[in-house]
Amino acid sequence: MEAQEELRRLSTAIDGLDEKAALRFGINRTDLRCVDVLTSAGPQKPTELAAAVGLTSGGLSIALERLERAGYIRRRRHEHDRRSVVVEATDKAHSVDDEIFGRIEQRMRRLLSAFEPGELEVILRFLRETRETIST
């Protein structure tokens, strides 16, 4: 099926982009997933971040140490619960993220603007269901 073949090619292209991004950041792909979540979704509690990237608490702790040393994240006390910590991306992380993904995001916005609202609903449903299929 042509659509399935195109999905395979898209997956390969995204994988290549992630590899280039990890090299530009100077980090491994697991750490890149952490940076991606933090730059796109905002600050997270460590347990939330671990769940989002599929790491154990120990694995996340090691990744956060590397990312903190590299200057891409910082940990701070939670605003409302001083016993809790929040992890956030630094300006350096946002800057590198914009450098790598900024133009792609602009081109994707232009591409998506060419579709009618009904078409976008179908695309969105397809993407969600594809992600769910892959994740289960």
Image: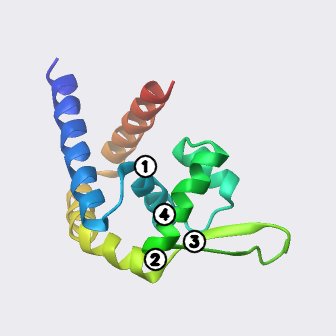
65 or 23, which is in the foreground?
65
112 or 58, which is in the foreground?
58
Discs 2, 1 touching: Cβ within 8 Å: no
Q: Residue at x 20, y 64 (%)?
A: 107
Counting residues from the N terminus, which is met first, the one under dot 3 or under dot 2? 2
Q: Which residue is mark 2?
A: 71
Amino acid at pointer 2: Gly
State the CA–CA distance, disc 3 to disc 4: 14 Å
State the CA–CA distance, disc 3 to disc 1: 16 Å
Q: Quadrant of residue 111?
A: bottom left
Counting residues from the N terminus, which is met first, the one under dot 2 or under dot 1? 1
Direction from residue 19 to residue 70 in the image, left or right: right
Which numbered circle lies on residue 30? Answer: 1
Nearest-to-viewer mark from 3 and 2:
2
Amino acid at pointer 1: Thr
Q: Secondary structure at mark 4?
A: helix
Q: Which residue is mark 4?
A: 66
Rendering coords of residue 82 (x, y %): 85, 75
Q: Which residue is mark 3?
A: 88
Amino acid at pointer 4: Arg
Q: Secondary structure at mark 1?
A: helix
111 or 6, which is in the foreground?
6
Q: Vertically, is 115 above or below 44?
A: above
Direction from residue 116 to residue 89 in the image, left or right: right
